[in-house]
Image: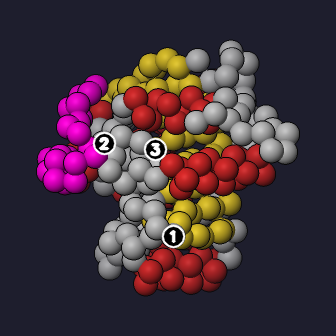
Amino acid sequence: MIATVEVTTPDGVADAYLARPDERPHPGVLLIADAYGLRPTIAEMADRIAADGYVVLAPNLFYRAGRSPVPPPPDLTDPERRSSFFRSLQPLIEQLTPERLAADGAAYLDRLGEVAAPGPVAITGYCMGGRVGWRIAAAQPDRVAALAGFHPGRLVTDAPDSPHRSAANLKAELYFGFADQDPSMTAEQIATLERTLQAAGARYRSEVYEGAQHGYTMADTAAYDEAARERHFRELRALLERTLGGRPRPAGEETAG
């Protein structure tokens, strides 16, 4: 079941996809999309996660610019068109300051709490969504039981407000599935992140998906890697079952992709 819902924030109203297996309350999952925004690929992923027994909310992060501020993308399997399209989105991305993300995140969690079962939720983020998910989990630590980031970028930078500097604020169990040879999250940056998480006493697992490119979960981009995407679903399912419960599947059973 997928529906479009509205989320009231301090700065306006954000539209969002809401996916759920049925009308009963289930544990909540906040899905933070990549920079290309809400589109069929994101809806399909939300629906698949929901089928495992979760209520999934995927908000339009760029709602300040309108209900559908990201225009229909060109052929994202064409690297040149993809790069040009991403550059056109930079002004929208730059609006997402840590302060705005903290306020938006509280509103997203409030809205999810209206339809999900009581208790902490999980966040799964993709590309820049991994960074956004981190900001929300750090700002609302008691409300987030799990945080997953897949091909996340720029979790470690030289900026004073780099996400990794707030690692001590996180209480969630963490899982990161990094892309191999990702310029937005290099091996050196991953090592820095891991040292920081260890020093903070965080519960985490960090893996590099060998051969997978940045964006490997997104079926509408040139980076799509079916094997890596399926691995992502398995790791996410295991994390959600450990931290939220949900609808465990018999050994060997997989959701159709």
Residue 239 in the magenta stretch? The answer is no
- Secondary structure state at the residue bearing disc 2: loop
In-image side of 169 versus 58 (left or right): right
Here the colouring is secondary structure
Q: Earlier in the sequence, mark 1 or mark 2?
A: 2
In the rendering, which numbered label is found on residue 210?
A: 1
Disc 1 versus disc 2: distance between alpha carbons?
Answer: 24 Å
Mark 3 Cα within 10 Å, few/some/many (few <14, many 20+)?
A: many
Which residue carries the number 3 mark?
A: 32
Q: Earlier in the sequence, mark 3 or mark 1?
A: 3
- The residue under label 1 is which amino acid type? Glu
Whether residue 27 is visible: no
x then y, percent, for residue 18: 52, 25
Range shown magenta? 65-90
Quadrant for residue 69, please give it: top left
Which residue carries the number 2 mark?
A: 36
Measured along the vertical axis of the image, is residue 176 above or below residue 232? below
The answer to whether the residue labelled 3 contacts the one labelled 1, judged by CB atoms less than 8 Å apart, is: no
x then y, percent, for residue 30: 55, 40
